[in-house]
Amino acid sequence: MATTLNRFLKHRSLSALSYRNQHQGLFISTRYDSLPSQMPSLRSTTRSFLDFYKFGNKKAIEDERARLNDEMNRGYFADMKEFKDHGGKIAAADKTLNPAVSAMKFPALAVTFSNGESLTLPVTPNSNEVNTEDLAVPKVSLVCLSFRASSQEMISSWSKPFLESFGNREDLQLFEVSFIDKWLLGFPPIKKLLLRVLQKPNNSENNVLQRQAVYAFGDHYHFRKQIKVLNLLTGYILLLDKSGRIRWQGFGTATPEEVSQLLSCTSSLLLKDQ
């Protein structure tokens, strides 16, 4: 009787142990055996995210390093030396219009008027902010870029004769853009204060064509790189067509011959658009 009972209990224990091991194995298999098929995808996704994160940082670091090298190699003293050599005349003005098919588009540039209103140059038919009542699309725009106060007189040598010749035209626009470095914007009121101090008198009250003084605040490094601005002490004069393409450009102080070329190219653009 005892032997039979022992055999029965041993059989029950073995059955229970077998059942438990079998189901534990099934449970373990369910939890872990299915993961190997998912783990490569999970590892791949995680690695891709980390690689992208590292790549993003690496790219940003490389861009910043290139920027620092560029600005250190092309700093104030280099600009000053070059300015002494040629007085800001880094190149002669174009004699004729650049072909439309090869002309570079003027990069989008956010500017601010002295009254605080903002605008994005160039003003083209596709501009979202164009209002036919307040801001008509010009056939030609003269955009004068000044990065330092030293170039203000240079700008005037171009804009003044331009106003005198086309002051009665409604289909042109003249923008004088002054760039304000980003470090000046560290204090909230500084922008408004600068706009008040830097406000220029309007010398073209009797003209239909107005000289519009605007300001570009912040970091303009990439903008300068796009239009190949090197020396910040000189002025850059750009003639844009209706589509915002740079069709002509001048530098530094205008010579009588270069003024004549600017006026001639402007007239040609106006005739082409008729």
Image: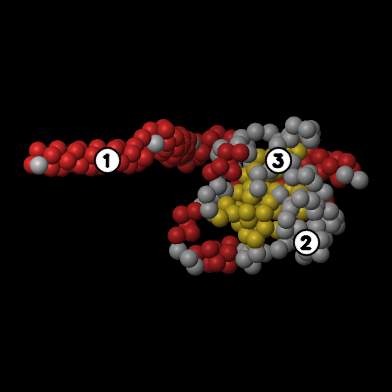
35 or 267: nearer the viewer: 35
Check disc 3: other Cα within 10 Å, few if <14, some if 14-19, many if 20+: some
Amino acid residing under circle 1: Tyr
Q: Determine whether the residue tagged by mark 2 lies in a helix, strand or loop.
A: loop
Residue 159 percent location from the top left of the image:
72, 50
Q: Is 102 placed left or right of 32 in the picture?
A: right
- Find residue 240 and report its image quarter: top right
- Which one is in front in this view, the residue at disc 1 or the one at disc 3? 1
Q: Disc 2 marks which residue?
A: 131
Q: Is residue 93 visible?
A: yes
Q: Which numbered circle lies on residue 19?
A: 1
Q: Determine whether the residue tagged by mark 1 lies in a helix, strand or loop.
A: helix
Q: CA distance from mark 2 to mark 3?
A: 22 Å
Dot 1 or dot 2: first in sequence order is 1
Amino acid residing under circle 2: Asn
Q: Is residue 154 visible?
A: no
Dot 2 or dot 3: first in sequence order is 3
Q: Which numbered circle lies on residue 105?
A: 3
Check disc 1: other Cα within 10 Å, few if <14, some if 14-19, many if 20+: few
Check disc 2: other Cα within 10 Å, few if <14, some if 14-19, many if 20+: few
Q: Is 229 placed left or right of 239 in the picture?
A: left
Residue 75 percent location from the top left of the image:
47, 39
143 or 255: nearer the viewer: 143
Q: Please, is residue 160 above or below residue 249 in the view?
A: below
Residue 45 percent location from the top left of the image:
44, 37
- Which one is in front in this view, the residue at disc 1 or the one at disc 2? 1
Which image quarter is the N terminus in?
Answer: top left
Amino acid residing under circle 3: Lys
Q: Residue at x 78, y 61 (%)?
A: 131
- Find residue 58 and report its image quarter: top left
Q: Residue at x 49, y 67 (%)?
A: 189
